[in-house]
Each structure stands twice: as structure tokens, then as C-alpha cells.
Image: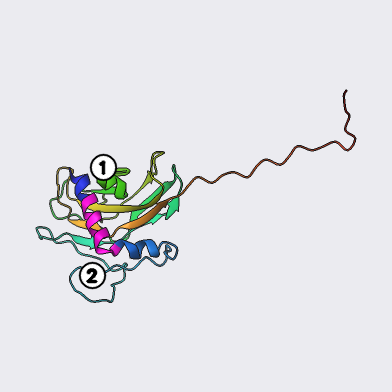
Amino acid sequence: MRKFLIALLGALVLQLGLVQAAVADDTTTSSSTPAPSSSTTTSSSTPAPSSSTTTTTPGGTEPQTGVFDRRPASGPVQTVIAVKSITPCVPPQGASSPEVEVVLFNERDLQQGVLTIDELFQVNADGTWSGKVTVPADAALGQNVIVAACFASPTDVEPFLIYQPQGFTVTAAAVPPPAPPGAVSENPTFVG
């Protein structure tokens, strides 16, 4: 199942420590300034800007990498997370029904072999995509990871583009403030 491939890729990235930067950058990411994207072909310590276009090369042994956006970065269960491409995943020539798979998981999910969220979205001809996922009621509180990968067709098991993981924190539901006490009459009457 390719959804576990995506989760394992995300776990590998976690082990390499790349998600820590995404999670630390949660509060500073804005729609006009996307988070930086690191290069996969050099060992340079200077990240490339995420607004650059990554070209996919069909038939390559390594999938390309890109950047996607998710908003918000945290929220309680039932939060709707909007996800969309920043780096387009332009399908290779001859691709039939390209799609992106978006998964949200945490360490517990990996240990149990499950995913908190697993959704598919169609990729447009220009490589752009977007969609919304909802944090389910049984989601574990704390740090989670969102990973996305592009596939040339629904039957492909190897992605042609993998997006850098994004952090998402499942928070406790906000507790509503207590209701104000009822108004007390100035001249109370007592029975008795």
C-alpha cells in the first residue's frame, strides 16, 4: 500500500531531522513568504527558496522534492486543514489521472501501522493541486506530520515528487468560559 510508503518516507525524513525545521517555522510561515526548501542534490547549507520551480524528470531513480502549504499549523479535532501545492507536481508525459496523496500521522500511528488522515486530490494539468482535510475526532493530541506525494496514476506505487513534511499540532479543544451568574434582584424575597 502506497499510503504506508508515504508515511515511511515521512518517518525517514523525521529521523533525518528535517521536520524539526518545519515545526519550528510553524509560527513564522505566511502566505507571502513560504518556508525555505532544501536542495536534494547538493550538501550545501544554504537552502533554496521554495518559490523556485522543481522540474520532475520521468524515469529518474529518485523522486523530486517540493514544498506545499497547510493552514492552520495547529488546532483541535475537527479542524479543517487547507493544503495546496507551492511547488507544482507537473505530471510526467503520458500520466493518466495524476493525483497527490496527503497523509497526517504521528509516531503512535507508525507503531500501529495506521494513519490519522489519508486523502487523495487530483492534480491539475499545470501541476497545481489543493484540498481540505479534517482532523478526526480520534486524533492523538500533540505533534503530527503532514506528508504529500504526487503519483502519475492511481495504480503507481512510486511517487514522482515528494513534498517536504509540514508539522501540525493537535491541540486540546478550547474550553468555553463559564456562563455569567444570573442577575440577582435588588429586593430579594424570601419564602419561609
**Which quarter shows the C terminus?**
top right
Vertical arrangement, residue 41 with respect to residue 3, above or below = below
Badge 2: few (under 14), some or many (20 or more) residues near its Cα, within 10 Å?
some
Q: Quadrant of residue 87?
A: bottom left
- In the rendered image, residue 155, in percent from the top left (x then y), is placed at 15, 43
Q: Amino acid at mark 1?
A: Gln
Q: Nearer the viewer, mark 1 or mark 2?
A: 1
The amino acid marked with disc number 2 is Ser
Front residue of this view, candidates 55 and 64:
64
For image coordinates 42% across by 54% down, the residue present is 71
Q: Which residues are magenta?
A: 7-18
Q: Is residue 126 magenta?
A: no
Report how far apart the C-alphas of labels 1 and 2 lie in the structure.
32 Å
Q: Is residue 155 above or below residue 189?
A: below
Q: Which residue is mark 2?
A: 39
> Which residue is drawn at the image coordinates 73% and 39% (left, top)?
181
Q: Could you say which is closer to the camera, residue 38 or residue 53?
A: 38
Question: Which residue lies under the disc numbered 1?
Answer: 112
